[in-house]
Image: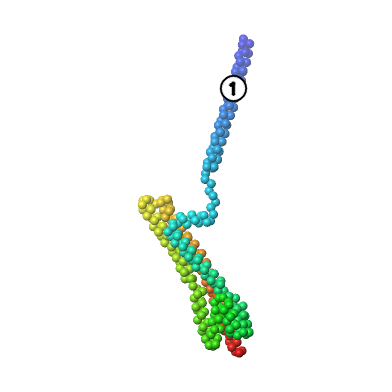
Amino acid sequence: MKKLIALLTVAGMLSFGLFTSVYAQEDVESNATNDTVATEQVAEEIAEEVTATLEEPIEENKGFHQVLKEQFIAGGAGFMGIVLLALIFGLAISIERIIYLNLSTTNTKKLLNKAETALNDGGIDAAKDVCKNTSGPVASIFWEGLNKYDEGIDVVEKSIVALGGVLMGRLEKGLSWVALFIALAPMLGFMGTVIGMIGAFADIAAAGNISATVVASGIQVALLTTVFGLIVAIILQIFYNYLVAKIDSIVNDMEDSTIDFIDILTHYKAGK
């Protein structure tokens, strides 16, 4: 009887140990399987993200000129073309005026010294040759004064004043056109704005609802035409102010040098 109980006890312990070992093995295998599945899922997700990233189009960094070109085209060829023409004509006139004014600039002090030296050494004809060989409105005024010298100082002053008015008109030639383009460019932009808003409201009426996609194109045209019109006006305004300042500088030199020139002629006449 004791042997039977001992055998049953040993058999039970062996069975329990075997069951525990099998259960533990199954648990380990189950955990390993779950870890493998989780790892595979994570790897698949990472692979999908990488693939999606590689398949996305790579946007190139656009330069300022490319962006400006795209926005210009988006604004519409109608008003944007007219604004561009205003810029081209305004710049053409401004550049021509800048070249003309720079050629008209004269070193008045140097010219006065040469004219006075030639006048004292060779007389009126020598001084006229010096003025004739010098470019610019100041030299032209001096030559006109020397040409009228025989008629008296009063006549010289009147002829200088008359010629000075004519030369000032030549210096200011073309400024009115630049001012016109400065005013015209933003006005065209505002007109494009109004037309773009009208088109946006027409799209809203046709669609029957207010949506960003419905009015986006019209509002874009409206804003772009205004922006480009203002940009053109700003650029031309800078050139216009430079031209005005340059003309004022030349006119001031003309007036100051004319006073000194009259004094030189007066002393020359008195010394004869």
- Give 205 or 241, whichever is nearer the viewer: 241
Q: State whether residue 75 is above or below residue 56.
A: below
Q: State whether residue 23 is above or below residue 162.
A: above
Residue 126 pos. (x, y %): 60, 82
- Give 103 or 38, whichever is nearer the viewer: 103
Q: Is residue 115 visible?
A: yes
Q: Is residue 254 visible?
A: no
User: For the point 63% across and 11% down, which residue is it?
Assistant: 3
Q: Secondary structure at mark 1?
A: helix
Quadrant for the N terminus, please.
Answer: top right
Residue 236 pos. (x, y %): 50, 66
User: For the point 51% across and 84% down, which residue is it?
Assistant: 158
Callout 1: 10 Å neighbours few (<14), some, many (20+)? Answer: few
Q: Residue under circle 1? A: 22
Q: Residue furthest top?
A: 1
What residue type is disc 1 on?
Val
Residue 48 pos. (x, y %): 53, 38
Q: Quadrant of residue 200?
A: bottom left
User: For the point 51% across and 74% down, which residue is it?
Assistant: 171
Q: State whether residue 236 is above or below residue 62.
A: below
- Give 242 or 167, whichever is nearer the viewer: 167
User: For the point 56% across and 30% down, which residue is it?
Assistant: 34
Quadrant for the C terminus, please.
Answer: bottom right
